[in-house]
Image: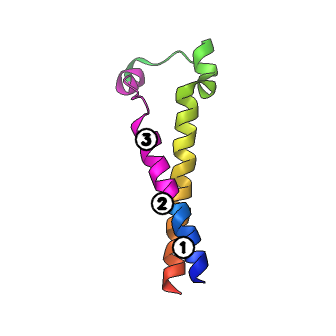
Amino acid sequence: MTVLKYIVLAIYIIVCIALIVVATIQTKDANGASEAIMGSSTSNFYEKNKGRTKEGKMKKTTIVLGACFMVLSVVLGVLYVI
């Protein structure tokens, strides 16, 4: 059981470092509030293919790493209680 704890802990540390790095190199969306007030045009080519850009991929990576972080936190909590 202790080997499993150390393996999960190592994966957890790698995910934490990757999440920090990915979150810090992301660009900030500057048009959040003004876009909500004035409305946005979602029919242009960029808006339809936003997920394929570098920023879209970084956003998806951050979401996946955040989900892994939460799951591993719960798993580590359970492993250390047992």
Could you tell me the amino acid type at mark 1?
Answer: Tyr
* Residue 19 place in picture, x, y as percent: 47, 48
Expressed as whole percent of the image width and height from the top left, the position of residue 54 reads 56, 26
Mark 3 and mark 1: Cα distance apart in space: 25 Å
Q: Residue at x 49, y 84 (%)?
A: 81
49 versus 78 height, above or below: above
Question: Amino acid under label 2?
Answer: Ile
Element carrying mark 1: helix
Q: Secondary structure at mark 3?
A: helix
Vertical placement of residue 80 versus 59, above or below: below
Residue 15 lies in magenta, yes or no? yes
Q: Is residue 15 above or below residue 7?
A: above
Q: Main secondary structure of the magenta part?
A: helix
Where's residue 15, x and y in %? 52, 54
Q: Which of the two marks, 3 or 1, is nearer to us in this view?
A: 1
The label on residue 23 is: 3
Question: Disc 1 marks which residue?
Answer: 6
Residue in the picture at 45% in, 51% down? 17
The residue positioned 64% from the left and 21% from the top of the image is 49
Residue nearer the viewer, 29 or 4 = 4
Q: What residue sits right under mark 2 in the picture?
A: 13
Q: Residue at x 47, y 40 (%)?
A: 22
Give the CA separation, mark 2 to mark 3: 15 Å
The earlier-in-sequence mark between 3 and 1 is: 1
What residue span does the magenta drawing correspond to?
A: 13-36
Answer whether residue 32 is magenta in the image.
yes
